[in-house]
Amino acid sequence: MGVLLVQAELIKLSRLLGVPVEELRVLGDESVAELRRLRNAIGAALHDEDQALFGKLVAATKLLPAAIIAAIAEKVMGPMLCARVAGLLDPRQVVEVAKRLATPFLAEVCLQLDPPRAAAMLKQMPLPVVTAVSAELLRRQEYVTMARFVEVITDDAVRAVARAMPDAAVLHLGYFVESPQRLGELVALFDDERIHAIVGAALADPARLWPEALSLMEQVDAAACERLARLGLAGDEAAVLSLLQTVNQLGLHRELLTVLGRLGPKTLASVGGFPRLADPALLGPTFEAAARGGALGRLIPLAVVLEPPLLDSLAVRLGRLPAKVARGAAHQLAEPDCMLPLQRDWTRLRHLIPASWVPAALEAQR
């Protein structure tokens, strides 16, 4: 996984610790898995502390009616303390109390709550309460908090919340959902028209939303990734140009190549061939990144639909790469999974291969 998922983990960790994300940049070289382990360990420590501190308080609440507990919660305890004890209470009792609390107060509690440890209670929460609180969190743009709840609330609740969300908000939310399976289930809730609108929303705020759209396509399974790309990019010149410009601006070529490598040849070919792609400055950095990363073969179905003058320009750029990179790329193109497509469309693809690569490719075939 690339820098996008690391950034998402740093944001989630900053929320847990209550510190600006800038103070955690020192952890930017850690893997996503390590950052999640750290966050989970901190969460577990806080949970153990809660049990020790609030055991007597939890025992006392069992003797009180839900209406009285709700009044005490809002007027005395406050949202942070309520969140700390909610996971320690009987889920049925919490549901009865929640039904009597104001929506803004419940939203404040959600900001402090640890959803995995309150999962039993959250799954029993009435749908009207869930949707009302979600609307309040959405109004506050609390996407990190909402994503954590997506992991544990019921499918019916996810469906109701997701369908009411603006298109851009789905991308914001999806960026922070941790489980690829749950993220795929979220995508599956939408029909083709809505998928097109969700991906297309990135055009309104490219620097912020294209990275989130790429992260979404990177995390879901191959079939969902194909669907997102086919409905959101294929045949849409404005979307493809905007994506490439953003990738070049932010240096997200590795993430783009991961997504392109998961697409079928037909879908991959359908994102190229537009007149305005004739500028080699748009596709050149992606082809160079593919050569450096041993992924040039992923772009052959795309190269097939590009015009020879553009391929000639790309070949000039590739020919300027360091000799070690060129040898590695040439050897990759000599592999059967690359060589067969090259031979099939050699009349056009020969324009992509720098002359300096040919000796290395021939050597690799021996």
Image: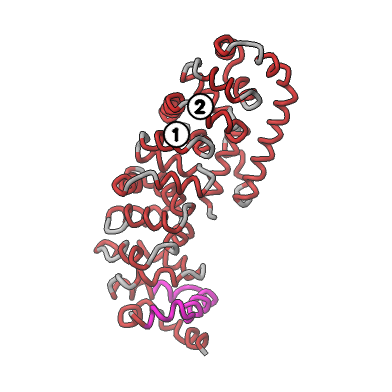
Label 2: few (<14), some (14–19) or many (≥20) C-alpha neighbours in 10 Å: many
Furthest-right residue in this view: 52
Residues rendered magenta in the picture: 316-343
Q: Are marks 1 and 2 in contact (CB under 8 Å)?
A: yes
In this view, 239 is above or below 133:
below
Looking at the picture, how far across and down is residue 144, in whole percent? 51, 36
Which amino acid lies under the numbered mark 1 shown in the image of this protein? Ala
Looking at the picture, how far across and down is residue 239, in whole percent? 31, 53
The residue wearing badge 2 is 125
Q: Which mark is residue 118?
A: none
The residue wearing badge 1 is 157
Looking at the picture, how far across and down is residue 258, in whole percent? 47, 60
Dominant secondary structure of the residues highlighted in magenta in the image: helix
Specify whether residue 337 is in view: yes
User: Viewed as shown, does residue 154 lie left or right of 49?
Assistant: left
User: Viewed as shown, does residue 349 lie left or right of 80?
Assistant: left
Label 1: few (<14), some (14–19) or many (≥20) C-alpha neighbours in 10 Å: many
Mark 2 residue element? loop
Looking at the picture, how far across and down is residue 240, in whole percent? 32, 56
Residue at horizontal 51 percent and vertical 33 percent from the top: 145
Mark 1 residue element? helix
